[in-house]
Amino acid sequence: MLKAQETVLEIDLKALKHNFDHLKSKLESNTKFLAVVKAYGYGSDACEIARYLEGLDVDYFAVAYVNEGIKLRKAGIRKPILVLHPQAANFDKLVAHCLEPSLYNAKILNEFIEIATAENQSNYPIHIKFNTGLNRLGFSKNDINYIASKLKGSKAVKVKSIFSHLAASEDLTEKNFTLNQIDSFKNISSNMIESIGYKPILHICNTSGLLNYPDAHLDMVRSGIGLYGFGNSKKENQYLKPIATLKTIISQIHSIEKGESVGYNRGFKSDTFLKTATLPIGHADGIGRQYGNGKGFVTIDGKKAPIIGNVCMDMIMVNITNIDCKEGDEVIVFNNNITAENLAESANTISYEILTAISQRIKRSFLK
Ligand SMILES: *Cc1c(COP(=O)(O)O)cnc(C)c1O
């Protein structure tokens, strides 16, 4: 690895392959793998990640919104792409780019059938989402007859999959709740199959579902965070490799005398002599203000340097009093040793949030 000369997010595609192989090894050979690449591939780079995974044994991709799917198509991705949360306003673009909508209530189902019919589609692949306890998106089990009658009235669409989403698959204290969701999904899907007269792909597991509920893999699993190297538990993290390393450099070093302050609003006031380093990364880059004032930290020469004072838009200042370093030296914000999850925990949040917050102005580089 080259020494950083500016702030850079390095993406290790070998680690991505390692994670994919590990997750695949948990599945029966006929279980399909859907790779979730929403939110810029969890903050990395959706197109590079999807291109790489398309060369492996991935069956499906998912994004949250239509514009994310269009970017993948423009990057040459050919495999099917499920759009988890499409809006009717973009349905014409969705169809034009062969993206497949998740439909979760009567309103959006009808809106989609209308568009697909107007565009003379036949058997356009759709995915029917059921709510089994997350209470976010999804039809209820009482809607099955309604959905079936709508589908019987239209040749424009065909159900490619039926799915649901687990609310607490990473939390083993909620095992009963999760088993209940799985059970309820199995009932719903067998009723749906009976009502529509054919069997679509069934899926309910995200990464933690895949790892913790092997009996619920069904026909396909949907994995996001696991591909990026996090398993939502210490045990599972051992087998995965974080693919992203966020590095920066020291722009300037200051000696702070007793009584001086550091940063906006004099967020830090020193009662002793200390040394600070100013780094070219701030809240506009994804290091939120909640990491300021001693909560978050970076690593320089293998030693922890806490963020001092308030996080600025484009910079942070860190305490380097006991670290032997100079201007231009490399700084690790997170890597596969001090992970994004470790940094996230310092501010009471989760790997998902810090990863997806890494802004687009940070350069990406790829280790192949
Ligand atoms: C984001 C998302 C996933 C992926 O979840 P991970 O925990 O990252 O594996 C799967 N399914 C749905 C519906 C999602 O929104």
Image (cartoon, grey):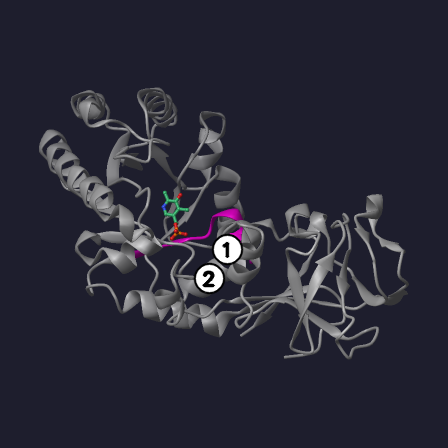
The picture quadrant where one finds residue 294 is bottom right
* 161 left or right of 46 in image: left
Which amino acid is tagged 1?
Ser
Q: Which mark is residue 228?
A: 2
Does residue 300 appear anywhere in the picture? yes
Where is mark 1, residue-wise?
A: 351
State the CA–CA distance, disc 2 to disc 1.
10 Å
Q: Which residues are drawn in magenta?
A: 33-46
**In the image, what residue occupies the spot 83% across and 46% down?**
264
Residue at 44% in and 26% down: 88
Q: Earlier in the sequence, mark 2 or mark 1?
A: 2
- Quadrant of the drawing holding the N terminus: bottom right
Residue 180 covered by magenta stretch: no
The picture quadrant where one finds residue 132 is top left
CB atoms of marks 2 and 1 within 8 Å: yes
Q: Is mark 2 within 8 Å of ligand 1?
A: yes
